[in-house]
Image (cartoon, rainbow, N blue to C red):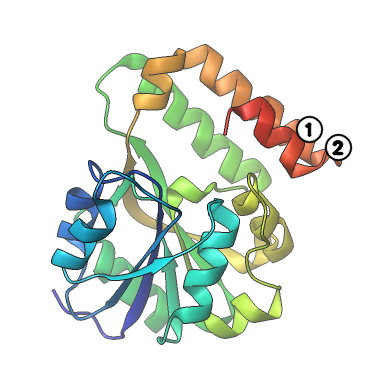
Amino acid sequence: MSGLLRLSVIIPTLNAAGDLPAILGVLDPADEVIVVDGGSSDGGPALARSRGARVLESPPGRGVQLANGAAAATADWLLFLHADTVPAAGWREAVDDHVRTTDGTGKAAFFRFRLDDPSPQARRLERLVAARVRLFSLPYGDQGLLIHRDLYNRVGGYRPLPLMEDVDLVWRLGGRRLTGLAVDAVTSARRWRKDGWLGRSALNLLCLTLFRLGTPAPLIARLYGR
């Protein structure tokens, strides 16, 4: 399924061996896949290498890991993905279309949010996320981020935050430099199943509110449980 351009796909990991086969299995082998590991003890880095990924060791913290991956990437286009988020069929064509039919270097793109859960709670959450994105131009990291290196550098890239690094970057991009792709990114729902649909969603909203009010990200990370 080789696309029109070469991507550097950057995936931060920490004990994500159970997630990696699914995401690595849908990526284009012609692309550069960089797994940035924050100190896993589950064999994830070795698994990633066996699947052809380039593995970097990094201090833990998603913001630091993403920034290190971007710095090491060699392609002009960067695609940031969480390890437990798998782009659905047609993702590569949507990426190529974004680059071909828009001023791609001036706009970043993201996928639609979907959960790998059949429950009504999952569908309601997906609708709420779609409304958040539509009203506030605020996709989270589990929707992926496709961005040209020039734009990434222009807005300052990922900052070394332990939490909210995705929101921080999206706010600096602004809604006029963001566009949605008509393809799902399917994320694991295990956090919601573990913590409860209402409890997990309320915690996410609380963290966002605190960050918006200027609370330091390390304090929010403690609340979040990282």
101 vs 14: above or below: below
* Dot 2 and dot 1 residues touching (CB under 8 Å): yes
Q: Kindly identify which residue carries mark 1.
A: 210
Q: Amino acid at mark 1?
A: Leu
Which residue appears farthest toward the front when viewing the image? 41
User: Which x, y percent locates residue 68?
Assistant: 53, 70
In the rendered image, the vertical position of residue 89 relative to residue 120, given as above or below: below
The disc at residue 213 is 2
Is residue 44 among what the camera can see? yes
- Residue type, label 2: Leu
> Quarter-wise, where is residue 54 in the image?
bottom left
**Residue at the spot 52% in from the left edge and 63% down from the top edge:** 66
- Relative to residue 158, is residue 40 drawn left or right? left
Mark 1 neighbour density, 10 Å: few (under 14) some (14–19) many (20 or more): some
Q: Residue at x 52, y 29 (%)?
A: 128
The x and y percentages for residue 41 are 33, 45
Screen quadrant of the C terminus: top right
Q: Secondary structure at mark 2?
A: loop
Q: From this viewpoint, is residue 103 visible?
A: no
